[in-house]
Image (cartoon, rainbow, N blue to C red):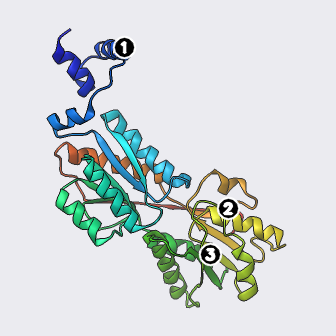
Amino acid sequence: MSAVTVSRCISNPDRVSRKTREHVLTIAAELGYIPNRQASSLASARTRVIGVVVPTSANPIHSMVMQGAADVLEPAGYQILLGHSHFSVEAECELVRTFLGHRVDGILLTGKDHSPDCVDLLRRSGTPVVEMFDYNPEPLDMSVGSSNVDAGAALGRYLIGRGRRHLAFVGHVGLDDSRMADRLAGLHLATEEAGLDAPVVYDITATPGTGQGGEIIGTIIREHPQTDAVVFAGHYVAVGAIRHAFDLHLNVPGRVAIAGFGDSIVSGWIRPGLTTIRFPVRETGMEAGRMLLARLAGKTPSGRATRLGFEIISRESA
């Protein structure tokens, strides 16, 4: 077997037959051979690595979007290098700097807000970038996601349509999270349309995705007893609030409705089940991967920003 064929099996496996590829890889494994990716990247100007920044992988929503991206990128020969920003644009910038130092072929970011230094780094590098989760009609490069303003407004209208008149919103303090801010903005739109008071806003310090912070439901009812619906910026903390409402003998949804954003299996397991907004998270990751592959193949995407939808999952909590 020629050296060229072996090289193709390692660097461009889609250019040889499956039988030949398996034969070469078997021998390579027996010899303990590990390809020198750094040397390969110097020769081809490609590292076959994509940098991905998410706030945290503790939240299954972020895990699902990463899986969607991997499902598209890995069959094309790319591997994912993961970094956690911890909801900090400064930490995101350092991750981007690190990724660029490793000469990644592309970067997937979470959200649409970035530090000026990060934006400057990415624009100077010319590296393809896809911003995920937020629909952004004027992206840094490319964007795919849902409108969180529309989602917030839709959930507000849903609650108001079911007779709720005094809404509260629970967010997370100290986080760089444009999605949370947009959801609150949408909720404001819904109450304004209905001629109602703006939502009462509470901030908690719990990290999103942990389920902690749900005890705030007791404080809200004590300080604003007229509140008849509480909307949480995420779904895990909303599930925690349902559990705390039970401990406080607060009937849900009779005394107070509880709703959130995002969905996972726990939202349906809790009783009453959580009414929430479901975003197409896996599809977001897959579309981000497809947009990146198109750019890397020298193709111009039909649109720089792809807008995905969302749906209200109506369960017993609201």
Please identify the quadrant where the N terminus is shown.
Answer: top left
The amino acid sitting under disc 3 is: Leu
Front-most of 238 and 188? 238
x 46%, y 60%: residue: 55
Q: Work out whether residue 261 or residue 163 is closer to the camera in this orientation and state it.
A: 261
Q: Is residue 230 above or below residue 290?
A: below
Read off the residue under disc 2. 315
For the C terminus, the quadrant is bottom right
Q: Which mark is residue 26?
A: 1
Answer yes or no: is residue 31 visible: yes
Tell me the residue at 46%/65% (across/down).
87
**Crowd rating for badge 1 (residues with CA inside 10 Å; few <14, some 14–19, many 20+):** few
Q: Position of residue 183 (x, y in %)?
A: 49, 73
State left or right for residue 82 relative to residue 172.
left
294 to the left or right of 243 = left
| Residue at 37 percent of width and 62 percent of height | 92
| Amino acid type assigned to the residue bearing label 1 in the image | Thr
- Specify which label sits upstream in the sequence, 2 or 1: 1
Residue 171 lies, in percent from the top left, at 56, 74
For the residue pair 279 and 160, the one nearer the viewer reads as 279
